[in-house]
Every structure is written in structure tokens, then in C-alpha cells.
Image (cartoon, helix red, strand yellow):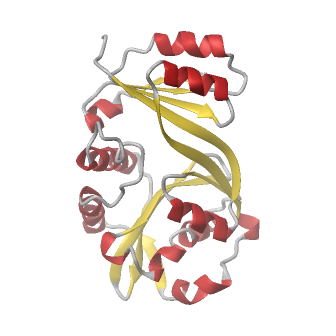
Amino acid sequence: MKIVDAVWERRNLGVSTQEVTIEHQDVIEDIMDTIKCLTAQYQVIKIPTGMIQAMWSLEDNGFRYVETVINVTYDLSQISLPEHFKRINNVIEYCPMGSDDMEQMYDEIRNGMFNTDRVAIDPTFSIDQASDRYTGWLHDEESRGTPFYKYVYKNKTVGFFALKKITEKTFYPFLAGIYNEYRRTPIGAVYLYKPLLEAKRLGGKTVSTYVSLNNFGAIRVHVDYGFVFKESYCVFVKHGESKC
């Protein structure tokens, strides 16, 4: 079991936050003892899919299910593009972002670019808070030197992706998206392919990332590309006044 005091979320969301990741070997008694000691205003529990007794116990203690997240991986030695995506891929380029591009990205996010994550759909929060959470996260990554890239179509920036190296041969494209103006166009079909190309160019052997079942479009595209679905976690949350 891993317990994290997510201090950055106070800046992002305005509330104290604790996140707990349950592991398969954890027993129900230890899980319940842990959650009873949580004191944060916003409590997040991630539990492997299938641990039904623990899930029901979380519900009995005031936690609510909000999403399922799935770890997916891709073997870059097998990289390929589905045939029906090749035409649009040929007219989409990508390159590193400059300062103006970064400001455009933050503006797009603040305009509600992401609206399916657990914060955005939580009625206790707002879409503005969800957007602040993304911009705070990306500002932190920018300060760490994480590279950001833009998608370019007909000389216009239409989206972005961020790519992080997590081991010597594994890359994590932790956030990517197409800007709202271009969301309902074929451009979205290739937003996964460019990070794969860049990870391979940088010497990566594997890409590992996460998708939420709340975002069915993303699930469908990952399936089309042949990502391997690994472990999944159900996410439960609880809101309350801080006891600190």
C-alpha cells in the first residue's frame, strides 16, 4: 500500500489531498485501518480491479466510485500505423514547442480542453478547478525540463503532447490532446502516433501510459493502435472537512 500526501493538489484544487494506492497483497483489515486514519479534505483511493470486498468496504465508509484507469503499454519495435490513419498522418507534423506555443496550450486547457477526468466530472469541484489542476501539473513539468511538442496542420498548431522518460528505455506520454477547434476532425486519429515516433527516435523501447474508461474515445484509439492493456485500478474518492 502506498500513501501520498499530495501537497500540490492544495495549490491546484484548494483542498488538502491524500492518495492511497492499494496493492493486490494488501488485506482488508489493513486497508480499512489505513482509510480510517486519513485526514485530508479530498481522499483518493486507487484499488486493483477485482478486489470487490475492499471496494464494498470503501463504499460503506463513504467513498464513491469515480473512474477506472488502465495502464497500457506499447512495444516500439512493433510500431505501425493503422492503414486508415495513414492519409491524415501524412499531413500532420510535430515539433518542439516555444514559449508562445506553451501559452496557447495553457489557454486551451483553461477553456475546458479536458473534461472527462475524475476532477472535471466531480460535482464537488468545477471545470475551472480541473483545468487549474492540469495547468499546475504542466507548469511543474515545464520547470523540470520535460519536453513538450505541438501538432501542426497546414501551418496551424492543433494540439500538443508531453513526453517524459521514466526509465532508460521507457517513455511516458503523460498528456496529449487536440485543441477544441479541431476536436471533431480526423486529426485526433493520429495524436497517439507522433509520441510513439518521438519516443523511438529518443532510443525508447517501450511506451507506458494510462487511460480512463471515462474517455471512451481514447480507449478506442489505443485499441486501434494495438496498445497492450495491463493492470487496471478503480478509483474511489471522498470529500470532507480536514481534521488537521
Could you tell me which residue is drawn at 70 percent across and 48 percent down? Answer: 230
Q: Is residue 104 left or right of residue 2?
A: left
The vertical placement of 134 against 176, above or below, is above
Pinpoint residue 62: horizontal percent, then vertical percent: 43, 22
Pinpoint residue 237: horizontal percent, then vertical percent: 44, 31
The vertical placement of 235 against 106, above or below, is above
The residue lying toward the viewer, choosing from 219 and 132, is 219
Return the residue found at the far right. Answer: 78
Q: Which quadrant would the N terminus be assigned to in this image? A: top right
For residue 3, say whether it is visible: no
The residue lying toward the viewer, choosing from 43 and 9, is 43
Q: Is residue 37 left or right of residue 154?
A: right
Could you tell me which residue is drawn at 60 percent across and 39 percent down? Answer: 233
Could you tell me which residue is drawn at 34 percent across and 86 percent down? Answer: 155
Pinpoint residue 52: horizontal percent, then vertical percent: 65, 29
**Which image quadrant is residue 40 in?**
top left
The residue lying toward the viewer, choosing from 69 and 80, is 69
Pinpoint residue 182: horizontal percent, then vertical percent: 36, 77
The vertical placement of 5 against 110, above or below, is above
For residue 132, say whether it is visible: yes
Q: Is residue 228 left or right of residue 132?
A: right
| Figure disc tally | 0
The vertical placement of 213 against 66, above or below, is below
Q: Which quadrant would the C terminus be assigned to in this image? A: top left
